[in-house]
Amino acid sequence: MKIQKVEQLLANKDFTGAKKLLCKMLLKNKINTDTMYLLSITEIELGNPTEALELLSRIIAINPAHAAAHYTKANLLVNQDRHLDALIHHDKAVELLPSNPWAFINRGISKAGLKNFSAATIDFDRAIELDPELGVAYGNKGVALAELGLFELSLEFLDKAIELEPHNVHALSGKAACLTKLKRPKDALIFAERAIVLKSDYAEAWNNLGNALNDLKRHGEALSSYERSIELRPNYAEAWNNLGNALNDLKRHNEALSSSSRAIDLKPDYAEAWRIQGNALSDLQRTEEALASYENAMKLKPDLDFIFSDLLHNQMKIFEWTDLEQRCQSLKEKVLAGNKAGDPFSLLGLFDCPKLQKRCAEIYVTSELNIATQIFSIVKRTPNKKIRIGYFSMDFHEHPVSHLIADLIDLHDRSRFAVYGFSFGARQNDFMRQRLEAAFDEFFDVNHLNSIDITNLSRKHEIDIAIDLGGYTRDARPEIFSYRAAPIQINYLGYPSTIGNFMDYFIGDEIVTPSSDRENFFEKIISLPNSFQVNPSVRPVSKQRTSKEHFGLPKESFVYCCLNSNWKITPEVFDSWVRILKSAKASVLWLNLGSETAKKNILKKFESKNIDARRIYFASRVPDLSDHLSRYEVADLFLDTFPYGAHTTASDALWAGLPVVTRSGKSFASRAAASLLTTVGLSELITYTAEEYEVLAIELAGNPEKLTRFKTHLIQVRSTTPLFNTALFARHIESAFEKAYDRYHAGLPPDHISIEAKA
């Protein structure tokens, strides 16, 4: 009778009354496991999990085969994120309840909590065998498959879960997360919102909604969603981390640092949060601290996507070369094996290996752009009266790419071409931005749009040829082109390597892209006469007279200079410079400053090689291009880096009359300066080994007559060389555009195109 009374009290949700009665019953029979079990359930309902766990442990001690006690204790431990402890009791529950699908589901949830997703799917499969109509089993399997990166298969199970249980918020939210991973944020938005309508206090759904909104560039709404998720679940590390990632996207790096740090406080073994913290610190130029964060991320999760390149690129920025050679070798092996270890851009500065670069791009396209599902065909249109060219860039402001291309935009033949600009970089109201906005026939500021909408805008304006000026550089949007922004898509200028099989053409020349290298590109090669690089015909000249003393350089010294980015200086290049400085004893080396940490580290390295630190000088960044060029006028010889050599810095130096000694290798990135030197008639400054590079640099320091001849030649040809003839370049590249356009409208696939030189 008392048990019936307890059951009635529990049914009426009078848990306090039920507890009092059960405690009285236990005073008479302290080892009655049925009474103890009912009391444990009552304690759970009263919000006393510790007391419930103690009771369940006593039951199991008395009766190790008490299936309900094992089942309930396991679930209580799961609620406390104690999955490893729970697993013991899940195993016993499955043994004692082999026909109960929920026992398998619960064990699968714990295995998933322990990141053993493959094992979790086996338990979910067993639950489905026992009850094929149990939607929650399909939903949990779908979420586990997504964690394994099997997103398409995941969707199949999540869809089945939703079909069986339309109100399954876990499956709806899981589908939103999966769709976001598949780069389908608009679809993801629908399912996250459905989950929230059904359960407005579901923190995970708010977090997934934030991820979809962030991908759609609806940053303000994304931040609100993450904040709502955190409000509902203050200790939700993933939401804190995603908030940090979104703040990084908005360039609010200090706030991003705070959010990712909070995620780490909550979950110290959260590798992804250490990565986001590293990204924020790197963007704040706190590179040493960033390296520590990346090191922690890699230690916790060695296979974290692209963590190797994050770490190595930041090591290069401050000349922190500890374990560099070993790590580079490991990175190379991982990429060749098909792992997501390095991003394409970072590899350019580490390896002179086009095969490796192509493999890396292929991995990146498959994993990050989901190219198998993202290529959308364009219905062939009737040819326009003018070929519509769209230039796409995040750098339409004071930036080297814009300085190179601005004159070309002005000079395009408007009787044959309509020229459009699509800017997805943060707006900067500087002179170059204003100039470019005026130069294009139409200029679209699309930074606020997501990549799909940018693609659709391009299609709406019937762009015939879309030119990507970014590739895989910082803030680029290659996904615009994976969605197919135009019938013809061209990789040009901003990124010196192959992008992917969704691009049709790559613009090069006989030096940077010889026919023997075509297999290293997904794209077909457009080979221009002279050099691939467009240059302004005139560069601004500083109004102030300059001298070595003006820049703090010793008047009587021979000045070697290299104003390339710090991360392009490899240990191999550094060793060459040491040997050059030791041989050319009256010389000094003038470098880009970078950061104070970089300066301190490289000076230590020179001193360790017995090079007096007083022979190393540093140039700070100057905002005015004419002031930048005036520095080249006082230097004696430009020393290029390898394998990622000078591009714009080389053409700037040559314009200013400064000879460039370069080392040409196998990759486009290493051959850019060779292309420029060949075009200005100074191919004798091209070397092919470290020894040749050093010998030539030393020889020119001791042969002022020869050096003067090179400098005089550069000044004399500046107004006649094709390298600085933008109008001629415009005719060549327009001829290439027309050939590609004609092939397309003739129904022919892209093919290699070689352009004849025009007078």
Image: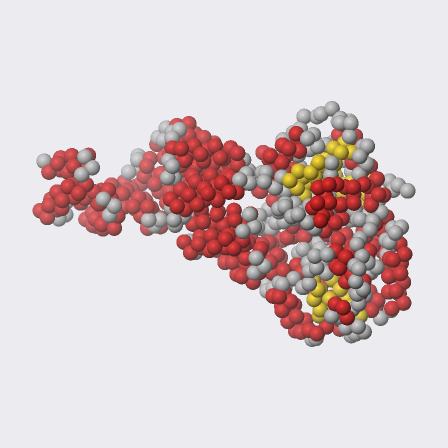
Would you say 563 lies left or right of 141 here? right
Would you say 477 lies left or right of 704 here? left
The x and y percentages for residue 88 are: 32, 48
The x and y percentages for residue 567 are: 66, 59
Determine the image quadrant of residue 460: top right
**What colour scheme governs how the chains and residues are painted in the rendered image of this protein?**
secondary structure
Camera-side residue of 308 and 18 = 18
Residue at figure coordinates x 61%, y 49% from the top left: 343
Residue at figure coordinates x 18%, y 35% from the top left: 12
Camera-side residue of 57 and 560 = 560
The x and y percentages for residue 444 are: 66, 38
Determine the image quadrant of residue 466: top right
Determine the image quadrant of residue 367: top right
Residue at figure coordinates x 79%, y 59% from the top left: 542
The x and y percentages for residue 736 are: 80, 37
**Can I make out residue 6 in this image?**
yes
